[in-house]
Amino acid sequence: MWIKKALNSQFLHRLCLVFTLAGSVTWIAAWVAGENGRVWGFTQTRLYLDTICFLLIALGLRLGCLMHHWEERLGVRPNPYGYTVNPPIDKATLPPLG
């Protein structure tokens, strides 16, 4: 059951940031490579295709992050934030400040 505790919205958010960063780096590398050049042994076309893949994965992770966040907020999933839920699930509340 460790996977349910590890796979939460915080983890998905951080993983999304990693893939977004990888996509940004490959996009810059493709721009630096130029039309006939290479960066790290990859052509410009390959780097642009890698950028698209990284950003699509990041988008999917972001959607998963939003879904997990709302499920954690409603009490459907265990959450790392400390939200409290009153018996009807539609009355999810945040803990008091302080």
Image (spheres, grey):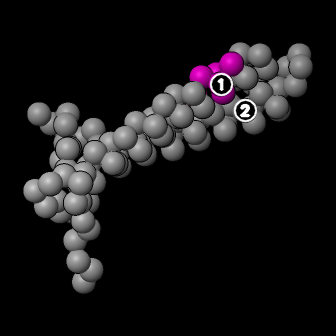
Q: Which residue is mark 1?
A: 52
Circle 2 SS class: helix
Q: Residue at x 14, y 54 (%)?
A: 88
Examine the rendered structure and indicate whether residue 7 appears above or below residue 74.
above
Residue 36: mark in rendering: none
Q: In x, y percent, where is residue 65?
A: 40, 42
Circle 1 SS class: helix
Q: Which sits earlier in the primary sequence, circle 1 or circle 2? A: 2
Q: Which residues are magenta?
A: 49-54
Q: 77 or 91: which is nearer to us?
A: 91
Q: Residue at x 10, y 56 (%)?
A: 87
**To which quarter of the image does residue 83 belong?**
bottom left
Q: Is residue 86 magenta?
A: no
Q: 32 or 96: which is nearer to us?
A: 96
Q: Dot 1: within a 10 Å radius of its alpha carbon, few (fewer than 14), some, or many (20 or more) residues?
A: some
**To which quarter of the image does residue 68 belong?**
top left
Q: In x, y percent, where is residue 54?
A: 58, 28
Q: Quadrant of the C terminus?
A: bottom left
**To which quarter of the image does residue 95 belong?**
bottom left
Q: CA distance from mark 1 to mark 2?
A: 9 Å
The answer to whether residue 40 is left or right of residue 66 is right
Q: Quadrant of the N terminus?
A: top left
Q: Residue at x 68, y 31 (%)?
A: 26
The answer to whether residue 5 is left or right of residue 29 is left
Q: Which residue is mark 2?
A: 27
Whether residue 11 is visible here, answered yes or no, is no
The answer to whether residue 51 is left or right of residue 60 is right
Q: Looking at numbered disc 2 in the image, what kind of residue is underneath it?
A: Trp
Q: In x, y percent, where is residue 81?
A: 26, 60
